[in-house]
Amino acid sequence: MNKGAALTEHTDRAERRATGTDGAAAVRLEAASLAFGDRTLWRDLDLEVAPGEFVAVLGPNGSGKTSLMRVLLGRLALSSGHAHIAGAPVRAGNHDIGYVPQQKTIDAGVQLRGVDLVGLGVDGHRWGLGLRGRAERKRKVAAAIADVGAEAFAHHALESLSGGEQQRLRVAQALVGDPKVLLCDEPLLSLDLANQRLVSELIEQRRRAHGTAVLFVTHEINPILPLVDRVLYLVDGRFRIGPPDEVMTSEVLSELYGTEVDVLRVRGRLVVVGTGDTMDALGAAGAQHCHADTDPNRVRA
């Protein structure tokens, strides 16, 4: 089977899975294009994500990964085409979406506890709750905090928490509304390896337990590589969609970048060399090991 046929077969399998109980894909993009002036980020993008499917979104800076998140969140309009979440057109404030941003420094003096942050995922979009509503809110917040194992620090001020602890609470905030889709925009950035693994595992647990679809923007695929069903790789208006073993190859990335690119497997990790990016799509840390060809475990993909 040639590579194009393999990609088509895998896509067909995903499309057969991409129906929930109401017959709708968790995420659907049809002939979607996004441009700013004369610059096109991507054109004619067709993508269906099944309930419970994990799709990694990769590409260099400026390729439109975060813009894709903003489109699905209803914060940015497509130039053409259509985007749907759980069968309905995208819109701002969609409760079918949980959003996990990258870890950010909390300004000193911000009077916000972890439990308050998680609570914003319940009612941050509206004012006023009755007594029954407050009791239900408290139950949901407590359950989400328990799901990520954050009970010990949830009542502490955010500024006093480590980056990993803050990110666990952001995952809880995304989950508290019981979403059908998790949009994760660089959630592992600035975290150490232990916390990258922990946050990835929390998202994976949610996916498996509830059939939640995951779109995961990242510069570093290795921490999530065992979890990924398909990759959407964006470069300069071009894209490729398919399983990691068929997209993350020297041949495919060389075609996307329009220059020779090597994808190496080093001790079980993927490393991209030759993209010209300050940080390639698999992380600069791994590239430090690619200056010589003496490692017997290195294989060109």
Image (cartoon, helix red, strand yellow):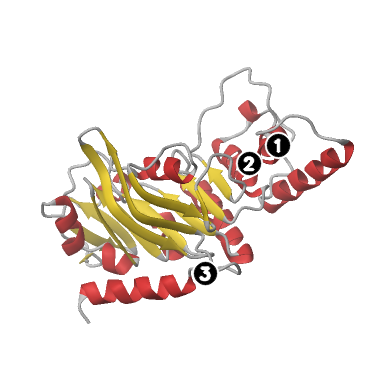
Q: Nearer the viewer, mark 3 or mark 1?
A: 3
Circle 2 sits in a helix, a strand or a loop, which is it?
helix
Say left or right for 57 vs 131: left
From this viewpoint, is residue 57 visible?
yes
Residue lying at 40% horizontally and 51% vertically, measured from the top left: 82
Is 95 located above or below residue 208 in the figure? above
Q: Position of residue 13 (x, y in %)?
A: 40, 75
Which residue matches tag 2?
169
- Tell me which amino acid carries mark 3: Thr
Q: Quadrant of the N terminus?
A: bottom left
- Badge 1 local density, few (<14 within 10 Å), some, or many (20+)? some
Work out whether residue 186 or residue 70 is closer to the camera in this orientation and state it: 70
Label 3 or label 2, whichever lies nearer to me, is 3
* Foreground: disc 1 or disc 2: 1
Q: Earlier in the sequence, mark 3 or mark 1?
A: 3
Q: CA distance from mark 3 to mark 2?
A: 30 Å
Whether pointer 3 and pointer 1 mark residues with C-beta atoms closer than 8 Å, the reply is no
Q: Estimate the x, y position of residue 100 in percent, counting from the top left.
A: 53, 43
Q: Could you classify mark 3 by the number of other residues whose Cα lies within 10 Å: few (under 14), some (14-19), or many (20 or more)?
A: some
Residue 102 is situated, as x and y percent measured from the top left of the image, at 48, 39
* Amino acid residing under circle 2: Leu
The residue nearer to you, when weighing 289 against 17, is 17
Q: Which residue is mark 1?
A: 123
Residue 220 bears which disc, if any? none
